[in-house]
Image (cartoon, rainbow, N blue to C red):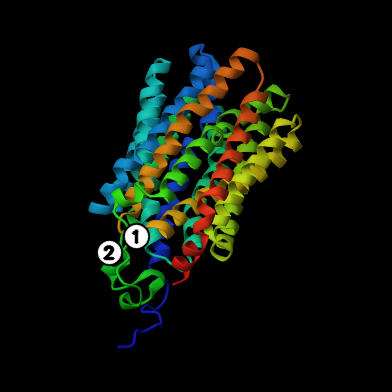
Amino acid sequence: MSVQSTPAHRGIFHGWFVVAGAFAVTLVGFGCAYTFSAFLKPLQLEFGASRGSVSLVFSLAGFLYFGLGIVSGPLADRFGSRVLAVTGMLLIGFGLVAAGFARNLVEVYLAYGLGVGVGVGCAYVPAIGAVQRWFVRRRGFASGLAVSGIGVGTLAMPPLATLLIEMLGWRGAYIALGLLAAAIGGGLALLIENDPNRRGLGPDGDPPLATGSSRADGASVAEAVRSRNFIALYVACLICSFGVFVPFVHLVPYAGDHGVAPAAAVLLLGVIGIGSTAGRFLLGGLADRMGRTSALLLMFAGMAAALAIWAVSAHAWQLAVFAFVYGVFYGGWVAVLPAVVMDFFGGRNVSGIIGILYTSVAFGTLIGPSAAGFVYDVNHSYTLPILISAATNIVAALIVVTTLARTETRSVTSATC
């Protein structure tokens, strides 16, 4: 019996609407989370706290929003991604509003850490996992487009937060951001769906018989986590994550320490966002052609090189160069990683497997930014944390070269069959 190869749909393939929903989730969720650098000094002044203790707010939230994928991913595989994504957006809104009413730093930990952390943790892995099932041939591009919301959010939200702080104070700014997250993020998250087969489609809009079920094939969670590929991915992501998010917390205060005006310093996060958006669009598609495992190696090496630029930068233009280059490779890393997981382990439990993998990022995020802040409190310099951050990405690249690169042929084959 012959199998049709012509598309089974007319007009816009519904998978792109799922991508749009995931884009909104990443834009609003991570955009709100990455405004934290703009709030760091106001929180220090309000509560008389050290830079390290305030940085711990972000680290706790980051630990939760990456770590909770181990719960939200399997729930999405079983019950669907939409309800988790909508719930996550509402929790982000609640957490930000609650942070605006905090009376001490502990209440900020609870409100921001639990609200934003649990909210992004509920929404992110289910949204990105859903996208993987809708595509095969263009999976890297679609994944990159979905997570490019993080880059756009990083570009747009910190300047918006700075403007709101100037107009409303830091408390009013948190309340305004919370209402924005709940209304826009929660509404657009309704576009997310788990499986093209429910619409009579296969991945990429092909007939279901041409590809089989996007959810039936693939490894079980137990099989995946015991595999050599998963262990290598986990260790690489754990090690690199000690440094990956240091710039998102400390680049703005670093620039201020070197005489950059506050308004210009916060724009550096926007430059990371521009680079990140470019990286997700361009490198996600490039990964489909060069092999997604090889592309992952490129991302680790690129982030290490960018952090080396930061270590010797003291002027605004130098920091802008760092921010853009770093953003490109950071964005590529976020775009390529879920597609690599899908290549290795299939679609049956992709959200659950991604969720477990992201616990590695959670532990790194918990330790890295706050440790950098405490090191600064001791010696009033970021040089050591920056160099360690670069070194962690080099180690991650070596793990990819020695372990994952051996399976590149299989990865490319599964992406093109």
- Give coordinates of residue 273: x percent, y percent: 59, 45
Secondary structure category for the residue under label 1: loop
Q: Amino acid at mark 1?
A: Gly
Residue at the limit of the structure toward the bottom, as seen here: 1
| Residue identified by numbered label 1 | 347
Residue 259 appears left or right of 194: right
Q: Amino acid at mark 2?
A: Ala
- Give coordinates of residue 181: x percent, y percent: 40, 41
- Which residue: 53% across, 19% down? 52
- Give coordinates of residue 196: x percent, y percent: 32, 67
Using a 10 Å C-alpha cutoff, classify the residue at mark 1 as few (fewer than 14 neighbours), some (14 to 19) or many (20 or more).
many
Task: Work out which quarter of the rendered image holds the C terminus and state it.
Answer: bottom left
- Which residue: 49% across, 17% down? 53
Residue 349 appears left or right of 310: left
User: Do callouts 2 and 1 mark residues in contact (Cβ within 8 Å)?
Assistant: yes
Question: Compared with residue 191, is residue 45 higher up or lower down, i.e. above or below?
Answer: above
- Which residue: 54% across, 55% down? 405
Residue nearer the viewer, 375 or 126: 375
Q: CA distance from mark 2 to mark 1?
A: 7 Å
Residue nearer the viewer, 19 or 71: 71
- Checking the image for residue 118, the label placed there is none
Question: Compared with residue 168, is residue 51 higher up or lower down, i.e. above or below?
Answer: above
Residue 187 visible to an observer of this rendering: no
Using a 10 Å C-alpha cutoff, classify the residue at mark 2 as few (fewer than 14 neighbours), some (14 to 19) or many (20 or more).
few
- Give coordinates of residue 291: x percent, y percent: 55, 61
| Residue identified by numbered label 2 | 216
Residue 2 visible to an observer of this rendering: yes
Question: Compared with residue 333, is residue 93 higher up or lower down, i.e. above or below?
Answer: above
Task: Work out which quarter of the rendered image holds the N terminus and state it.
Answer: bottom left
Residue 162 appears left or right of 360: right
- Which residue: 76% across, 37% down? 317
